[in-house]
Amino acid sequence: MKQLLAISSLLLSTALLLVGHGMQLTLLPLRAAAEALPEYLIGASASLYFLGFVVGCFALPRLIDRIGHIRCFAVLTAVMLSSILALDLLKGIAPLLILRFFTGVSICGLYTVIESWLNSQTAPETRGRVLALYTFVTLSAMMLGQLLINIGPITSSTPFMLAAMFMALAIVPIGITRKMAPAPVASARASFSLLFQRSRSAFSAALLSGLVVGSFWSLGAVFASKYSSSQLDITLFMTMAIAGGALLQYPIGWVSDKIDRRLVLVLLCVGASIISVAVALSVQQPWHLAAVFVFGAMVMPLYAVALATAADVSSSDEFVTIGTTVLLTNALGSAIAPMLLGKFMGSLGATSLFWSFAVMCALFALYLKLQLKDARAVTVAAQTPFSVAAPDAAPNSFDLDPRATEFPELDAGE
């Protein structure tokens, strides 16, 4: 309880921020679709958002060190909510592309401030519970944000104003806290070659997670809008996918503790391929939302299981670098795919989004199946427990993760 009280202001700011963030993630592509922008340009704007996230991982720790956590949080929140309001005011593709890039940079910096502060306020013995609580707050706020979009028509300013209000209110709990700001934030360290050397399975699963989940965040609402004019239907579509991932992530992680995690990744890819076909075929059917729920359950845990797979074959002093690389691989996949899949949607129809997911997941399943032929550096019994859900937020969450200090020293990966 003492730990919870110490981080209550941070968690409240996180919740308020991510309600607004969850709203804008769906609002922006829906507004762009309502303005008849082609799908490939909507996808390109999402690609720039994720590219901004990658840039923020490397550039913003210096800004935080220079002006401090509280002022940096206020500055980045101001930039983000101003960008969202400007997107409501300005029309055309150029403002959309530029401002979405800045929202990506800003949200990465905001995650970094929150996570580094949580890390400094959390005792080692409670880190797993704090990280699990942080993940729960993140997913719950994002789901609430989806539903609050229905406060007004997409073509009106009301949802944009509400999203900006939640983000502005997020400054208050952190701004009035009496807790000391944490120490300077280290710049992100990544090594794609090290991740690939330690675990080709983790590398490919992280990439697939970005390709599929990033594209779903970018174009899922546009897909839903093609088959329903009801905002409630569209937001329920997005909410069901998030709920599937949130509710099934830990059970899937528990299963991955009992068997070779690489096999779990194969099964998730096969399941995701099959359910993607089901989502494409079930449009306007009574069981469509159930299929979307299962889709979220199959694809959203890919990132966490990929991280756990890499952790199994990494030493303790490598975990932050390995984890950051898993995150950036995921983000790069998210930056690559939306523009290409948006082009497919424009020329082949909306369902091509999920047909593309089905093909990608099937191909990655074949590749991951081949990795099972190679012996692992650890046995199933020696796997690091999947003790916490892993948020794909910012690199500082890996300092908070208790797995950063629990690994044996290893010499090689798969």
Image (spheres, rainbow, N blue to C red):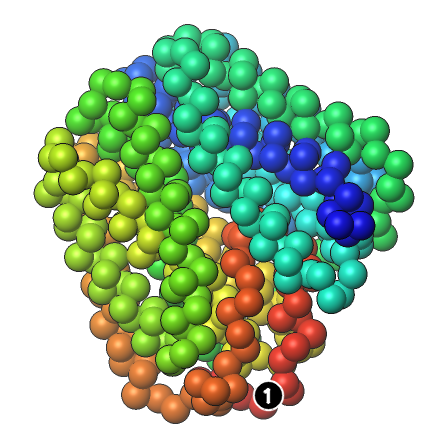
Furthest-front residue in view? 1
Q: Give the image location of residue 224, x and y in percent.
A: 25, 30
| Amino acid type of the residue that numbered disc 1 sits on in the rendered structure | Leu
Q: Is residue 22 above or below residue 391?
A: above
Tell me the SS state at disc 1: loop
Quarter residue 268 falls in: bottom left
Q: Give the image location of residue 28, x and y in percent.
A: 42, 25
Image check: 258 left or right of 341?
Answer: right
Q: Which is nearer the eye, 139 or 91?
A: 139
Quadrant assignment for the C terminus: bottom left
Q: Give the image location of residue 124, x and y in percent.
A: 75, 65
Q: Residue at x 35, y 23 (%)?
A: 30
Visible in this render: residue 61?
Answer: no
Total label count? 1
Image check: 270 left or right of 396?
Answer: left
Q: Is residue 302 above or below residue 74?
A: below
Quarter residue 137 falls in: top right
Q: Which residue is mark 1?
A: 410
- Callout 1: 10 Å neighbours few (<14), some, many (20+)? some
Image check: 36 left or right of 405?
Answer: left
Q: Which is nearer the eye, 206 or 189?
A: 206
Image check: 81 left or right of 268?
Answer: right
Q: Residue at x 61, y 31 (%)?
A: 17
Q: Give the image location of residue 298, x and y in percent.
A: 31, 56
Q: Is residue 243 above or below residue 192?
A: above
Q: Is residue 255 above or below residue 111?
A: below
Q: Residue at x 54, y 21 (%)?
A: 163
Visible in this render: residue 136?
Answer: yes
